Amino acid sequence: MVFSTEGPSLPARGLRIRGEKKRKEKMMTVSTSCYMCRSLVRAPPLKSRSAVRCPSAAPPGASGATSTSKLVLEVKERLAREHPGLPTGRNGRDDDDMVLWFLKDRKFSVDEAVSKLTKAIKWRQDFGVAELSEESVKSLYQTGKAYVHDSLDIYGRPVLIVVAAKHFPSTQDPVGNQKLCAYLVEKAVSRLPPGVENILGIFDLRGFRVENGDLQFLKFLMDVFYYYYPKRLGQVLFVDAPFVFQPMWQVVKPLLKSYASLVRFCDAETVRKEYFKEEIVPPDFRD
């Protein structure tokens, strides 16, 4: 008999190959089954994740109204304990509506709401916002450089209009300009109808020249809407901006951050047709 030294015969080799193939298929099946089992494991409950909150929504909790009321009370108690010298009453540290608005702005963070409210109420007190009136800003108000339109826009928003060509920072009192600004913003916000939360700002840039530019005032205006009247500005229209305005916009835009998305460049015709009915178009924008 002759013995081969070259390994198993062809039939034996075929059996071994088929056996190895079956073992691999079995291992793949087990691996796939384990993978599918892992993929079917449920995600952890929402409470173990970071909650994403909507600024205008109620805070997470069992009952929205009750939870919100508790947060409002907590903020008021913190303000009374930590800042007893802050005024009370309308727009004061115990004003439920104001506290709730700042809570929404700060996504229901009590610490952040207390901090921002403290700054806003102190500013109102130091700036004398409650004492501002048309008479107190009469000299600049009569220039027509800024005013609150008598009618709402088609979305039901109060309208604050600034005529840039009538603003002369080199000859007009900067503090007076700030007081006029605060008076008009306060006036516009006080005219908000039920269910409407923000105002429309229109900057009429027709006739704008270099001498009308005022970066310091624009910074003040940004502080007003970010710190003291958060989320009260719904949209800003820059109307018929001339080329000379572009360098200033390039400086201001980064400072606005996310608020830059509120700005729309348009022409006077757009203002007339898209924001007002014919009979209530502001005088400066009528044909």
Image (tube, grey):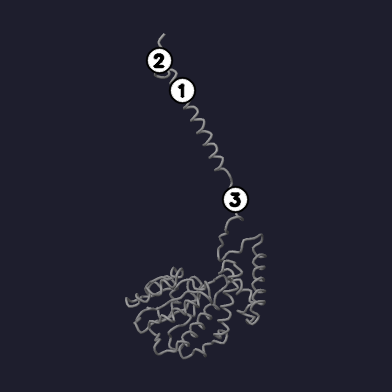
Labels 1 and 2: the sequence-earlier one = 2
Q: Is residue 70 above or below residue 39?
A: below
Specify whether 9 is left or right of 81: left
Q: In the image, residue 155 lies at what x, y percent?
A: 49, 70
Q: Out of 276 and 183, give the one closest to the viewer.
A: 183
The residue that label 3 is drawn on is: 44
User: Which amino acid is tagged 2?
Assistant: Ser
Q: Secondary structure at mark 1?
A: helix
Q: In the image, residue 264 lies at what x, y percent?
A: 41, 70
Q: Name the residue at the top extreme.
A: 1
Labels 3 and 2: the sequence-earlier one = 2
Q: Is residue 59 above or below residue 198?
A: above
In front: mark 1 or mark 2? 2
Specify whether 154 is left or right of 53: left
The residue that label 2 is drawn on is: 4
Q: Name the residue at the left extreme.
A: 243
Q: Out of 229 and 19, give the one closest to the viewer.
A: 19
Q: In the image, residue 210 lies at what x, y percent?
A: 34, 82
Q: Residue at x 33, y 76 (%)?
A: 242
User: Residue 147 has which mark?
Assistant: none
The residue that label 1 is drawn on is: 16
Q: Is residue 8 above or below residue 198?
A: above
Is residue 184 visible in the rendered image? The answer is: yes
Q: Residue at x 49, y 30 (%)?
A: 25
Q: Give the CA distance from mark 1 to mark 2.
A: 18 Å
Where residue 205 sits, quadrant-wise, is bottom left
Q: Give the CA distance from mark 3 to mark 1.
A: 46 Å
Specify whether 116 is left or right of 219: right
Quarter in which the N terminus is drawn: top left
Q: In the image, residue 204 lies at what x, y percent?
A: 40, 78
